[in-house]
Image (spheres, coloured by chain):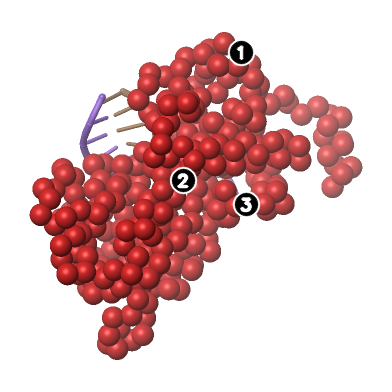
Chain colours: A red, B brown, C purple
Amino acid sequence: MPELPEVETLLRGLKKRVLGRWLGAVDVRHPQVIAGSPDEFSRQISGRQILGARRKGKAIAIELGLRTREDGGEKRYLLVRLGMTGQFTVNPVAEPLEPHTHVRLGLDGGKEELRYVDARRFGRLRSLAGEELEKLFGGMGPDAPRITESQFQKALSNRRTPLKSWLMNQQFLSGVGNIYADESLYIARLNPLIEAGQLSARQSRRLLRALKHVLERAVELQGTSFRDYIDIEGRPGNFLPQLRVCRRCRQPIERVVISGRSSHFCPHCQPQPRHRTRRAKAKRLARS
DNA sequence: GCAAGCCTGACC
DNA sequence: GGTCAGGCTTGC
């Protein structure tokens, strides 16, 4: 299931395999995975050269060059969001299609193609003009692996939403999904229900450190082995049965639902926020 | 029946 | 504006 490290891996793969190549025929086999009109999508992206690819959070934008003068000199971007089961692969055209292959993008002379496969069809492909892309990426918070401490703290301030929801809200910080949100909260020993804006400077530093550590580690391990990487739920990828006890203190892991997402945490190591004392409140007021 | 990411729409 | 529930989808 693609979280940021998986998306980063795809980005690297795309750069390696398709940069400089030309998109030929576009075959949309299941219109649902195209945002907007599938016909327009095909028309807008086919016949263009792949000039680059970049990522923000879990979204990838593939830069497509000018085709002819009739394009009005407009570049296009192919925006890819993998949802939860989306995959992109380069295959020989003659190779049999995997089930759930929804889009085929011909490459160059037509011997190979890019295939979009997505069992659950939560993912979306979309054709965007340059300014549409800038607007979209501009509306997203800083990319999680690159956010600075001051950006992080600023984004947290005054947010009343639970820390867990905050971490997963792409407009504050982009690229964090459920697993890495839980995992970084666990490492930072922070309860998912703490109000985001209530974190002390120290706690937010701890959280950011944990988050970056988890993401970096996951990117490193991608494609080699996840075997020595076990998240809080005990899932290396997500195959192993769930871990029921905290690996730090051996107490049972608790599950709560926050903004419709299940969150796993250790009530002992990540204690519930204490209610604010009058003294703490006075202190806060004095500071502001 | 539950899990996921993201969008829509409803609520204050 | 900020926040959150609901719905999409299918394999386990």
Horizontal side of residue A108 vs A35, given as left or right: left
Horizontal side of residue A15 vs A258, given as left or right: left
Res A259 visible:
no
Check the residue under mark 2 and report the chain it is in.
Answer: A
In the rendered image, the vertical position of residue A260 relative to residue A106, given as above or below: above
Circles 3 and 1 in contact, beta carbons < 8 Å = no
Res A240 visible:
yes
Residue at horizontal 29 percent and vertical 88 percent from the top? A69
Instruction: Using the image as rendered, state which of residue A71 and residue A278 is in the foreground.
Output: A71
Mark earlier in primary sequence (3, 1): 3
Q: Give how far apart the Cα atoms at labels 3 and 1 are.
A: 31 Å
Image quadrant assignment for residue A205: top right
Which residue is tagged 1? A249
Residue at horizontal 20 percent and vertical 59 percent from the top? A113
Is there one chain holding both mark 2 and mark 1?
yes
Circles 2 and 3 in contact, beta carbons < 8 Å = no
Mark earlier in primary sequence (2, 1): 2
Q: Secondary structure at mark 1?
A: loop
